[in-house]
Amino acid sequence: MLKKSLRITVALIAIVLVLDLFNVSLSSEAKADEGLKDSAVQFLSNFYETRSEAIANSRKANTFLNDYSKDSTKLKVHEASRINFYHNWIKQFNGTINEMHSYIYPIKYSFQINNNKASIEIYEWITIKRTRKKKNIDANSLPAVKKLEELYKTTKNPLLKENLPYRIEELKKEAENTPTNITSGIGVYHTVVLLRNGNSWKILKDSYNEGFDLTKSPDFKESKKDRKVSAEHEPYLQAQAIHITKFYPQSSYNHDSALNYADYCVDPSSPDGVPYTNDDFYNLNYKNFNSSGGDCANYVSQCLYAGNERMVKDSSNLYNGWYYDNNDTGISDPSQYNSSCSWLNDDHYSNSWIGVGSLKTFLISHNRGYEYSTLSYAVKGDVLENAKSNVPEYQWHTMIVRSTPSGDLIFVDGHNNDRYNCPYSESTLERNADYCNYSYVGMYHEYPLELSNSEGFFYPLNFPVIRRIDCN
């Protein structure tokens, strides 16, 4: 009996020793993988910064181009031509690139390694500092100003006539006060495949899409499934006849407040050397829809609400109206931040709040703005929407106009792709006609609040601007 007990004890000790050795092995592997991840992230951080610097300083081009694998010829050719592309892109807006920088943020749990090959997802924020030659413009003679002045004389629409003087003065003011030093920001997601040789890395693949007006890598493949408009938007995508029967006193849209919010929630600034992701600057009191159709309309709706646009709820159909309801479970202080985002689970919102196309439908049907098709009429705070029958749903997009320095040029802010103060021109849109067919909602500065019989104003609670970067 004693011998049997001794054998059992010895066997148990052996099992424990084996398990300890196994755990030590797993721990060593985990530490090794973590070390390789840190090495890869440091490599990519240096790589993307040099890649951006090379656009302003061509002498640095060979430095980052040498970091590609010999098996990534197409990608390397694309990246070499991307340097000229960016110069020509800025040149068409009468500008010159002075500085260009990149910060990267690795997406959590995306690092995977198998033998000598690794993959990782990152978010890159590109900052472009440039100068723009200021043209001597007689604001009174701008074609857009002349046409709107003529429209003011001939229009039979009293609401449009009431708002045209504001629009005309804004166009003049923007043309006369165009800054010469401009900073823009662009957010880009990358999926990178790396090859390892000891402690050094080479890039084999880099899949990214900077947006229809910029570049996409030869490794990028459009995923219609990922970009398709969320099914919850669909009941309201098509324009619906809304019979307005109730009228309320005059209201106003504060364009400057809308744009202050727009900048704050797609912030281009970052302390040197501190990477961040776009999530750090999104308002945590709203759900992030980037993984379910895109966050662009949600972001523009937030900007409009920050500009004093009133939310509307429809008692007959909660998908209609224009509102975001967090059921009073939002964050009122950064110290309340909960990384699980559990407070978002009970949120409700209309299709027009989060859906491209239905947002425009609401704004126009409720006389918050009017539709036009000429970029030169745009003023700050207007809404751009790419949502027409000849454009696939997965390519629908919306942005907010940040400034309009001349008749053929505007600057925009947007989410997904994240953009801060980025230029668009009529020629840009024309060159990409297969992708985009933008129309514009000219937001009225002043207007009567109008509702249907089943609609009422909605007053949300706990909606301060809380960003992850502000939280402890």
Image: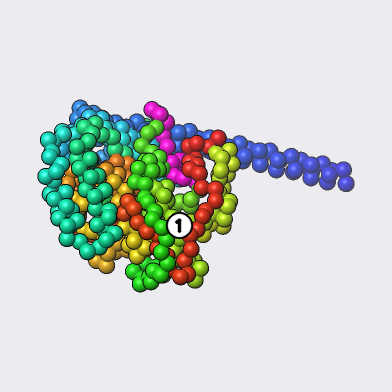
Q: Is residue 37 left or right of residue 190?
A: right
Q: Residues within 10 Å of mark 1 (few under 14, many from 20)?
A: some
Image coordinates for residue 294, horizontal then vertical, percent: 39, 55
Residue plotted at (48% across, 43% down):
465
In this picture, which residue range is highlighted in magenta? 271-284
Q: Is residue 297 above or below residue 276?
A: below
* Residue 391 falls within the magenta-colored stretch: no
Which residue position is annotated with label 1? 311
**Residue 281 inside the magenta-drawn segment:** yes
Vertical arrangement, residue 291 with respect to residue 450, above or below: above
Instruction: Evaluate whether residue 113 shows in this view.
Output: no
Identify the element where label 1 is drawn.
Answer: strand
Q: Amino acid at mark 1?
A: Met
Percent coordinates x, y for residue 109 in the rendering: 49, 44
Q: Is residue 431 left or right of residue 281?
A: left
Of 4 and 161, nearer the camera is 161
